[in-house]
Amino acid sequence: MKQILPGIWQWSWFSEEKKLDFNGLLLTIGEHRILVDPPPMAAEDLTQAKRGGQVDYILITNRDHEREAAALQKEFRCQVWVPAVDAPQMAITPDKTYKDGELLAGGIWAVQLSDQKAPGESALFIQQGKGILIVGDALIGKPPGSVGMLPAEKYADAAKAKEGLKRLLKYNFDTLLVGDGASILTGAKPIVEKFLA
């Protein structure tokens, strides 16, 4: 687990199948400590996560990013929040479901994206500093320094899915933290704009 921004740590688990890093985040925002889309955690990462105090919430961005949420919910005795639309298709029983436009714990905005692989696919927007956008499967960071989408066969309509991502451009963000691949810590919005043009 490494600190990538003030109050934000990331750890990764390499997927042999996808040939990509699956990333999890630990956010410390105000009084809250929040995990996002947690992949498997090595023992030293778990120790480091515990060192900072209690984790209050696990936020999941889409039905396919449950990952290690159930195990970590038991470990930390914390709440799990998931997109309302995806909840019926998930194994985990959430403590709360969230909808588009909702203000979540820590002042994080939920931004639901249309026509994605998962119907509840949501980005998380944090309005601190120059703006931080967290995405699950909406965009992947591959190759490093650029963004792309999942293979076309993952969508009902890949062109509509790409169009649905243009909603992200309404937000002011400098940092893009991705669930899969390499995150972009500065200058992210122009890269996303170029990809979606």
Image (cartoon, rainbow, N blue to C red):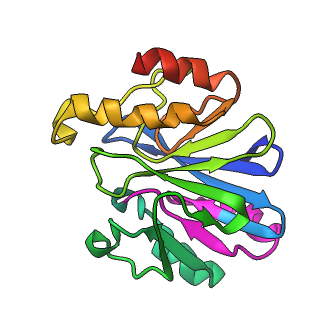
Q: Residue at x 40, y 26 (%)?
A: 148
Residue 117 x %, y %: 27, 47
- Judge whether residue 1 can be spotted in this image: no
- Judge whether residue 29 can be spotted in this image: yes
Return the residue nearer the eye: 189 or 141: 189
Quadrant for the C terminus in the image: top left
- Quadrant in the picture for residue 133: top right
Q: Residue at x 38, y 52 (%)?
A: 121
Return the residue nearer the eye: 153 or 191: 191
Q: Which residues are magenta?
A: 35-62
Q: Residue at x 39, y 46 (%)?
A: 113
Q: In this rendering, would 40 be left or right of 17?
A: right
Residue 146 x %, y %: 51, 20
Q: Is residue 49 magenta?
A: yes
Q: Residue at x 33, y 66 (%)?
A: 85
Q: In this rendering, would 70 be left or right of 57?
A: left
Q: In this rendering, would 67 be left or right of 42?
A: left
Q: Is residue 130 magenta?
A: no
Image position of 60 with respect to 165: above or below: below
Residue 84 x %, y %: 39, 70
- Quadrant in the picture for residue 108: bottom right
Return the residue nearer the eye: 66 or 94: 94
Residue 25 x %, y %: 63, 53
Q: In this rendering, would 113 be left or right of 125?
A: left
Image position of 92 with respect to 184: above or below: below
